């Protein structure tokens, strides 16, 4: 994950949140690491002033209202927002952890046991969302954060109230992630049902277990054709045999052939218990396996003035698609990370280490990569990648940096970065 200091044109504060650095960006907006006056970390999502119009502001306001409505232990929470501000902004819970897309791209697919644990957790979380009368509509690997306390779902920017045919998108326009999108959503059918999230969860679990989505194509028109064609079966290659029956039903073309989320939970439980474990034990193994020590903010703030700084990344995980304007060009949003050599993969009981970290020692901090939401914003609103700033004292113990010192260091970084920045 690449992290950039604030540019000279970035605000230093929004809505009372002090901004410490950039953790994602896209065509429609920017996501910053923020800190409340009381020291609470947050991901602050801002719409660029150049693209703020009535429609954008209305969609942003809808996202805020939905985030106020949705809740749950596995849902990253809204902290504060102002859709009427100039520019509009919202702040969401900070989650220390890689997103699933980045984790699989770095460490390879998850073992079957851990994929089943992930499935039980996310299915239960989505069931809670559905009980609140909402649909996520854009579940994908980049919208699943593997935090220190377990997985969390983020980015409800495309969420809608179930059984609602209302939409802020133009006719013949489909917004979402094609590689995880069910046929009915790809065809623009309305209203959508909870089965749309069951399909997307199946795509997420397939990616977790195999490293690839149900359909793959360089040309986005071909990809959409594969998704909506009932004669083209999803590619389940690479998935463990014990998971294939469940994944096949979750990715069924017809909505009525997909299982309910409660059934998904039960089937995942059965797979876990067949290996002699309880669900809670599998969850702990999943969390231990995906936790990663990074201290990325430590490294960023520790760069001496004048030294080179890490460059910002614009990796794209998914791209909004306007069906009425689809061209024959390739879509970078559909390129999946390449899994490493299987010989380098860890077992479920091995925890990832970082340079300078002894294998087997406790790991608490994690990092996550940014992704693109429905407005093209890379970097999810629900908590992100940077560990809290720490310094090593003479005793060797870690202690929190005073906020004033963090501000001073961040300002020096901005000055050094600005000297070489292309803007």
Image: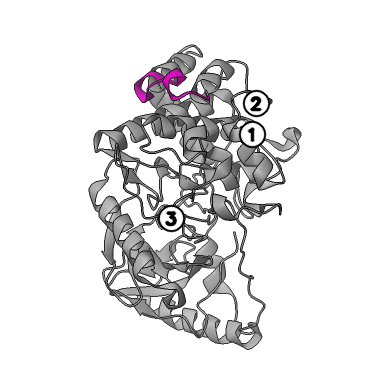
* Disc on the earlier residue, 1 or 3: 3
- The residue beneath circle 3 is 170
Span shown in magenta: 253-263
Q: Nearer the viewer, mark 2 or mark 3?
A: 3
How far apart in space, not on screen, are marks 1 and 3 (Cα)? 24 Å
N-term-proximal mark, 2 vs 1: 1
Residue 262 to residue 358: above or below: above
Q: Is residue 158 left or right of residue 301?
A: left
> Where's residue 111, x and y in %?
59, 27
Q: For the residues marked 2 and 3, what is the alpha-carbon distance in whole angstroms? A: 28 Å
Residue at mark 2: 232
Give x and y (percent) for residue 256.
Answer: 42, 20
Q: Is residue 126 magenta?
A: no
| CB under 8 Å between discs 1 and 3 | no
What residue is pinned by disc 1?
226
In this picture, residue 34 sits left or right of residue 178: left
Image quadrant in which you'd find residue 85: bottom left
Is 354 situated above or below 122? below
> At 38% from the left edge and 56% from the top edge, which residue is drawn?
94
Name the residue rendered at 64%, 47% in the picture: 334
């Amino acid at each position: 994950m690449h992290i950039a200091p604030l540019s000279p044109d970035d605000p230093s504060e929004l809505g009372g949140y002090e901004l410490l650095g950039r953790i994602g960006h896209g065509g429609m907006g920017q996501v910053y690491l923020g800190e409340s006056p009381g020291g609470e970390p947050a991901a602050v999502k801002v719409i660029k002033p150049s693209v703020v119009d009535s429609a954008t502001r209305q969609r942003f306001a809808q996202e805020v209202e939905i985030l106020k409505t949705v809740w749950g232990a596995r849902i990253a929470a809204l902290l504060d927002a102002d859709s009427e501000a100039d520019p509009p902004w919202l702040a969401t819970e900070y989650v220390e952890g890689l997103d699933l897309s980045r984790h699989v791209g770095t460490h390879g697919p998850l073992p079957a046991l851990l994929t089943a644990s992930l499935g039980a957790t996310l299915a239960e979380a989505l069931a809670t969302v559905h009980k609140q009368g909402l649909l996520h509509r854009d579940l994908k690997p980049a919208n699943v954060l593997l935090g220190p306390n377990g997985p969390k779902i983020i980015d409800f920017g495309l969420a809608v109230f179930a059984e609602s045919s209302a939409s802020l998108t133009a006719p013949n326009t489909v917004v979402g992630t094609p590689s995880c999108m069910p046929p009915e959503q790809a065809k623009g059918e309305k209203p959508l049902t909870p089965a749309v999230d069951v399909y997307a969860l199946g795509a997420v679990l397939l990616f977790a277990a195999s490293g690839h989505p149900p359909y793959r194509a360089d040309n986005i028109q071909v990809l959409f054709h594969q998704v909506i064609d009932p004669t083209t079966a999803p590619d389940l290659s690479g998935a463990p045999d014990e998971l294939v029956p469940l994944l096949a039903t979750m990715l069924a073309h017809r909505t009525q052939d997909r299982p309910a989320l409660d059934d998904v939970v039960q089937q995942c439980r059965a797979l876990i218990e067949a290996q002699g474990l309880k669900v809670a034990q599998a969850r702990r193994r999943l969390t231990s396996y995906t936790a990663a020590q990074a201290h990325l903010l430590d490294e960023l703030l520790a760069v001496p003035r004048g030294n080179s700084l890490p460059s910002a990344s614009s990796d794209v995980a998914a791209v909004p698609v306007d069906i009425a304007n689809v061209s024959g060009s390739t879509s970078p949003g559909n390129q999946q990370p390449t899994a490493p050599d299987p010989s380098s993969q860890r077992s479920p009981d091995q925890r990832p280490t970082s340079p300078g970290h002894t294998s087997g020692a406790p790991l608490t901090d994690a990092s996550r990569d940014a992704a693109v939401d429905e407005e093209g914003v890379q970097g999810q609103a629900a908590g992100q990648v940077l560990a809290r700033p720490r310094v090593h004292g003479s005793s060797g113990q870690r202690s929190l940096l005073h906020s004033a010192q963090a501000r001073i260091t961040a300002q020096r970084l901005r000055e050094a970065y600005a000297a070489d920045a292309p803007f």
